[in-house]
Amino acid sequence: MKRKLYQYGILLGLLMSVSACRKDMRLFDKEVRPTLEEYGKQNPETKLQVTTRLGNFTIQLYEGTPLHRANFVRLVKGGYYTDLFFYRIVYATAIQGGAEWMYRLDYDLPTEVDTSKFRHKRGAVAMAQYDPSMNPEGNTSASEFFIITNAEEARKFDGIYTVVGEVTEGMEVVDKIKEARAFNEKPVDPIKFSIRILD
């Protein structure tokens, strides 16, 4: 019995290791800007499809935030946004998804905030920031994003978070996710999602 449990533990560890490798999208800090600038030139895609059990929706990434666009596309193509969760529902404001802070990638992005072009309107897709104790420079999370459901409530975010795109189709699906039963902002039944490139 002990031997079987031991073998099961090894198998589970290997599976977790494979999963981690599949989603290992590390970048060293000094390489972030030049790497993403070059990646963005070679990967110009801007249109994404998000698939959930409640339906699908489309995101159009902005070319006006080139580092964030390139980073988002890079993570999608690398399989990072496969079988992750919308793990937070901010009442009357937004839904948030990606990898929570304890699973954060080992790099952040310099902000690309431009309130003259991009604001936190309904359907806006923006990148989160970690707590100042972990992020004193106020940089952007490489993987956590949120989608605005109420622009009135989200005005306070303008000038702080980088808006990287917007939902162009399927906003009703985002609303369904927002209405999911939650406790302390955590969905009782987390909504899994995957993202793929459309164009």
Image: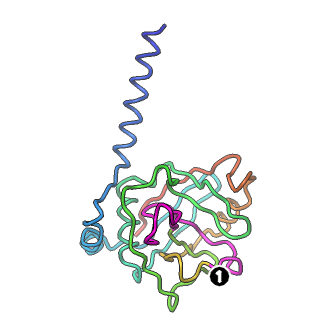
Q: Nearer the viewer, residue 132 or 121?
A: 132
At 40% from the left and 41% from the top, the residue drawn is 19
Residue 32 quadrant: bottom left
Total numbered labels placed on residues in the image: 1
User: Is residue 152 located in the magenta-colored stretch of the structure?
Assistant: yes
Q: Position of residue 116 (x, y in %)?
A: 51, 92
Q: Quadrant of the C terminus?
A: bottom left
Q: Position of residue 28 (x, y in %)?
A: 28, 60
Q: Amino acid at mark 1?
A: Arg
Q: Position of residue 15 (x, y in %)?
A: 40, 33
At 45% from the left and 75% from the top, the residue drawn is 61
Q: Nearer the viewer, residue 131 or 182?
A: 131
Residue range (magenta)? 128-156
Judging by the rendered image, the residue that carries numbered circle 1 is: 155
Q: Nearer the viewer, residue 23 or 174?
A: 23
On screen, residue 20 versus residue 43, left or right, reads: right
Q: Position of residue 92 (x, y in %)?
A: 73, 69
